Amino acid sequence: MKRTGAQLIWEVLTREGVDTVFGYPGGAILPAYDALVGYENIHHVLTRHEQGASHAADGYARASGKVGVAIATSGPGATNLVTGIATANMDSSPIVCITGQVGSAVIGKDAFQECDITGITQPVTKHNYLVTRAEDIVRVLREAFYVARSGRPGPVLVDITKDAQNQEVEFIWNEAPIALPGYRPDLSALPEEFDRAMQLLSESKRPIILAGQGIIMSGAEEELRKLVEAAHVPVALTLLGLGGLPDGHACNIGMMGMHGEAWVNTAIQEADLLIALGMRFDDRVTGDLATYAQNAKKIHVDIDPAEIDKNVKVDVGIVGDLKTVIATFNERLKPQKREAWAKYIDESRGEAEQHDILQAADEGTLYAAHVIDELRKLTRDDSIIVTDVGQHQMWEAQYYAHNQPRTLITSGGLGTMGFALPAAIGAKMACPEKEVWVIAGDGGFQMTACELQTCAQEGLDLNIAVINNGYLGMVRQWQEMFYDKRYSETPISSPDFVKLAEAHGLTGARVETVQEVAPAVQASQGNARTILTEFRVVPEDAVYPMVPSGKALDKMIRRPRKEPAIRQDT
Amino acid sequence: MLNPNEPIQRRALQRQLHTFVVYAEDKPGVLSRITSLFRRRAYNIGSMTAGHTDVPGVSRLTVVLESDDAEARLIEANLYKLVNVLKVEDLTHVPAMKRDLALIKVKANAEARPQVMQMIEVFRARIIDVAPESLVLEITGTGDKIDGLLEILSPFGIIEMVRTGGVAMTRGSKATTVHPHFVHALVPQDENS
């Protein structure tokens, strides 16, 4: 049967199991939007900016594990997607972005809304395509979905010229395996590397597992739990790894890195073996590389061979899918007890917990930590928290307890402010039955606040917590600590968030005291539509502990006890 | 090929010229993907040549760049991440022939000509164009050999010079790249490798 190129796009999406796409129409993608009318199985969410569409596709992918889809027109529509694509690329999120392109006859002629989007996105996509003929659309889109979700997932962009969308061709659906001779998502580990890994583990007295997002992407949570319970290995998680092992699990010692708890980072520095599972030794996780885990042998498991030895030179490198790799570990494992090591970590934890702000006497001052703590108490284990980037993001990671995978959606690698609201829209579309919370700062929220209207048009039930301290808080914290408190351009004003919500036809609320927090959270949960609650918190709070950038992982600035003075540990 | 059992720390962090042979699908933009990768990862390309192979749809590139062995392995792994890249081989530690081609236009009037011709003979270069005041010569060889000839000829006055950059091939009867290999991983065998 004959189909236009535009129809072929939706035919492939339908067969790839896509039921929701996020996008924004425009000139060069008009044929695709016209054809969409005939495909009622696909729900299109109209975001208010294309960046929102790519973030929403990303949020959809992270919440569901399926490929998220964003659509935009050529030129500015396509370039507006880029921040969302780069975000997905850094965090290995599978999305497919489809952009319209000017007619193939005028490519290179600087036509209206022409832009070389495949050139622009080359460094921030896993792969991309320019399609100029309708007969290539089916093959290319199938490849795009396959590449996006297989191996180490990532974003794929498909740029389709307007004439290719308009051409009529015979629609042939081919179920044959995709032929990409150079693409190798199916690497597996060398047997001898397993031998050496098991040897190192059996010899180790102070091992630590560093678990990253790979656990969640591979669906290896159960395998990880079995491994740590048999081998008695404490587990530290990366920011994106939170939820990979339940927070309440006895072996889970918490988040590592720049804002990880002191006992976690100290334990890493004192370990004799690091087992890195699906994490990439980001600089926010290692601190100064020259002093990082000096006494530890290192095993690194990753699906991407280019990650092995990239930042940290390792003794054993295992390439493969984590679920399979850890299952092999578990088959070969001899159960071991490591009581002294567990006791040591427990003791250092007990000492540090007393510094916790929630333990401090309640003076009525509202801290962001109070808000996160109430959310932890009042939300369910399967509630999804989508954060923006900055102080609130780190407080969320510290004070919330993620007990299930895919319950924290946050921009880790790229650190994209403005991510939360659109990504939460995507998450809610993927999991309509789940409670979804946005936690954003007053700065980041204003970057993509236009997406409130998307919530209104879609009738979405999001719970939005804006943590308002009147500053770009994390930058202010760095200025306080490292730039002599010169608050250059970090004080930021905000609109009246209650009125803003109301202007969008949503409900707004404001909270200024500790006592109001829990009722406000419950009120938001009880409402079937989106509520924006502004939490006015203390202006100059800082995230502790903090490993200053480029410093050794155990040289952190500790949480002050009562007085807000900063104490440098040496 | 590097020995994965040898700790990387011991493979001295010596920087040297590494020669990679890269097979890639002959599709628009593939060259740009490869150069973009080198730029993004801050690898400094010494030279890069590209051309067709005996297999339709497959290009062969030779890339020469300075790196240590550990970085060279990452370069290889990153090249493999490009969907259009089929095979990569680092020829640095295997017996291989490396050749560069140069065309050199050198000043050579009647007086200087005999001397120039003598040099050309020693270096086994060929004269491919003669004009009253100049000669154009062609030389193939290692980069060092061409550098040597250029040094000898420079006193006469080099008018213009062009070099292709290196191309390379392993010695012996085996093809240069037979099958993709990764230091830490097994690759499923495919039929047409």
Image (cartoon, coloured by chain):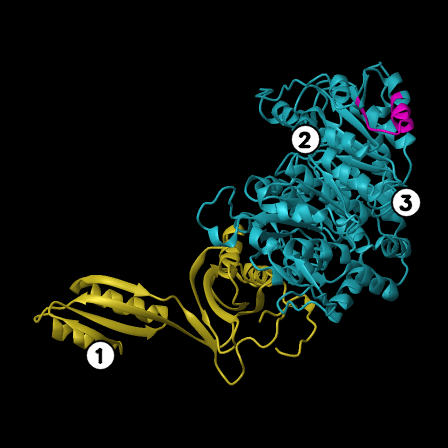
Q: Colour of chain B?
A: yellow
Instruction: Read off the magenta span.
Output: A520-533
Neighbourhood count class around disc 1 (C-alpha, 10 Å): few under 14, some 14–19, many 20 upward = few
Which sits in the foreground, A568 or A548? A548
Which colour represents chain A? Answer: cyan
Q: CA distance from mark 3 to mark 1?
A: 79 Å
Residue bearing the label numbered 3: A249
Rendered residue at 46%/55% (across/down): B44
State how many labels appear: 3
**According to the image, label 1 marks what residue?**
B121
Q: Position of residue A539 (x, y in %)?
A: 71, 18
- Is A390 located above or below residue A206 in the figure? above
**Mark 2 vs mark 3: which is more N-terminal?**
3
**Front label number (2 vs 3):** 2
Callout 3: residue from which chain? A
Q: Secondary structure at mark 2?
A: loop
Residue type, mark 3 in image: His
- Report if residue B52 lies within the magenta region: no
Can residue B89 be seen here? The reply is yes
